[in-house]
Amino acid sequence: MHSGKILSLRCFVLLFALLGFCAPASAASPIWKISKGQQSFYLAGSIHMLRHKDWPLPEAFDTTYAKTDMLVLEADIDKMYDLRIQLPFMILPQGKTLRSETDPRTYRKFEDFSARLKLNLDNMERFKPIAVALQLNIKLLYKIGFRRKGPDYHYSTLARTQSRPIDYLESVETQLEALAGTDPATENEIIRQGLESLDDEAKTKAQLFRLAQEWRTGELPAAEKADAEMRAKFPRAYKRLLVDRNTAWLPKLDHYLETGETEFVIVGYLHLVGRNGLLAQLRQRGYRVEQID
């Protein structure tokens, strides 16, 4: 499995969690200014794979990047492509196979989807179920036109070229532990329901196109509804993938309001929304939260 295919579960979570909940777009941009007195940083939501037509990015991205001093990402994107880091989290232990670690109903969905996408499931038997789900998910995204990496990758590359400081909210290992560490029963259920939601390819394509448009303008109601549904259906995975990570990030975000510099923080869009989302928690801390045009 090519390392790019198992880059991140963030895209997987967004795709499966937001399908069917895309509302008409009418807001400004997916970027918010967070302030305390004279200190501030900017917080942007990212979709990690986009279509060619989604570029250029909303103007607010370049404007914000230009007036900030440091880029902040969830984790080091370059290290996400390092197989030495990825594979221990994605390969099954000796003696275990994809079939042995997957319930029969979920395995049948793997068989159906791999056949539909012209992939050989036998070649993926040594990978954990979540890694195989990522392979199928990203293959489908490619098929319907999501072929370009998102703003986090774009600005990471730009910042390195310009020798601009970059900070990270968590390590790649921490992120992979969260992504690969869901209990087997919950993991199987998430994967199966996610794949079932993608059975109608035409519907999936239309919904994802609407999602991309909603993201561009910073619309939140659809994502809020998806957040509530994920919390209700998969509470343990929701806590591990979103709540716990958001909570761990907050001290760093607090610190950015004490540095005397202005940071540009880019995270997955779903991290922003809901009662446990970063926007709500930053408001609860008494910070001013303003959406950027």
Image (cartoon, rainbow, N blue to C red):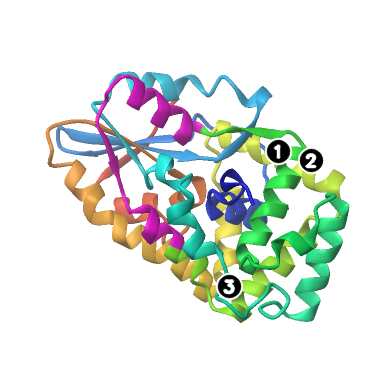
Q: Nearer the viewer, residue 51 or 175?
A: 175
Q: Which residue is found at the position 61% from the left and 72% from the top? A: 187
Residue 76 in which image quadrant? top left
First in residue order: circle 2 vs circle 3: 2
The answer to whether marks 1 and 2 mark residues whose Cβ atoms lie closer than 8 Å is: yes
Report x, y in % for residue 62.
42, 20
Q: Nearer the viewer, residue 6 or 211?
A: 6
Q: Is residue 21 visible?
A: no
| Residue type marked 1 | Arg
SS type, badge 2: helix
Say whether residue 158 is magenta: yes
Dot 3 corresponds to which residue?
234
Residue 234 in which image quadrant? bottom right
In three-dimensional space, the C-alpha distance between marks 1 and 2, rounded to whole angstroms, equals: 6 Å
Most common secondary structure along the magenta stretch: helix
Residues drawn in magenta: 151-176
In three-dimensional space, the C-alpha distance between marks 3 and 1, rounded to whole angstroms, equals: 24 Å
Label 3 vs label 1, nearer the camera? 3
Report x, y in % for residue 83.
49, 51
| Residue type marked 2 | Ala
Q: Is residue 249 above or below residue 147?
A: below
Q: Is residue 185 above or below residue 143?
A: below
The answer to whether marks 3 and 1 mark residues whose Cβ atoms lie closer than 8 Å is: no
Say whether residue 195 is magenta: no
Dot 2 corresponds to which residue?
206
- Counting every numbered tag in the picture gives 3
- Mark 3, other Cα within 10 Å: few <14 / some 14–19 / many ≥20: some
Dot 1 corresponds to which residue?
210
